[in-house]
Image (cartoon, rainbow, N blue to C red):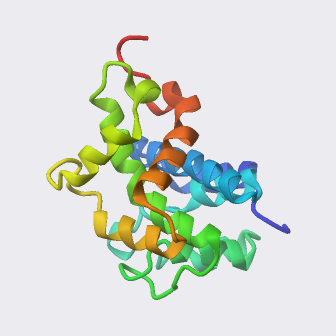
Amino acid sequence: MEKLTLAEAERLNAAMVTEEHLILHAKNVSYAMGAMARHFGEDEEHWMAVGLLHDYDYEKYPEEHLQHTEQPLLDAGVPAEDVRAILSHGYGICTGVRPESKLEKSLFTVDELTGIIQACARMRPKGIQDLEVRSFMKKFKDKKFAAKCDRGLIQQGCEMLGMEVKDVAALCIEGMRPHARELGIAGTEE
């Protein structure tokens, strides 16, 4: 395959990922990546596919994340540059693959960022429907809120992209909002 398609990413991910929260996270990242692709004038479906597949080995190998990704994906026909992008989201945590392209830097950044957006949206009566960046930034600055989401990595990613956290968050919210019901963040006041 020339580049990873969404259908192929869904097929590969479904073969490895069964836990609901991991499937949800993959979708969050996928939709956020679609918005990032739109922003940069890139191929939306391709970026979404890479986002969907980014935690391919996490469920089976949480302690060895991304150590069981490269060869299986290459063997499945996933292009080397897409595999590299997936490996780069673990830069400095579990891989030495530094994000270089806009695709890689975006994936590195939105991985943790979508977790905070998801948590913010779940607390609101209207979910993500009326979530504004201002509200997100208040929660972002509160280190106790969604404490497992690494703000340092988000900041590092935004610096790599040459963007402010609030601007990347706005794009991610925009990308996730149309899929609110599927993502469980449509709120209780529907």
Name the residue nearer the viewer: 182 or 75: 182
Name the residue nearer the viewer: 16 or 39: 39
Q: Quadrant of the N terminus?
A: bottom right
Image coordinates for residue 40, horizontal then vertical, percent: 69, 60
- Confirm whether residue 4 shows in the render: yes
Establish if 162 lies above or below 48: below
Name the residue nearer the viewer: 80 or 61: 80
Report the side of 105 relative to 38 (left or right). Answer: left
Establish if 86 lies above or below 48: below
- Confirm whether residue 72 shows in the render: no
Q: In which quarter of the image is residue 95?
A: bottom left
Image coordinates for residue 184, horizontal then vertical, percent: 43, 29
Report the side of 177 relative to 71 (left or right). Answer: left
At horizontal 47% and vertical 33% (from top left) the residue drawn is 183
Name the residue nearer the viewer: 5 or 151: 151
Q: Give the number of marks.
A: 0
Image coordinates for residue 146, horizontal then vertical, percent: 23, 49
Outermost right residue: 2
Establish if 71 lies above or below 147: below
At horizontal 31% and vertical 38% (from top left) the residue drawn is 135
Q: In which quarter of the image is the C terminus?
A: top left
Q: In which quarter of the image is residue 75?
A: bottom right
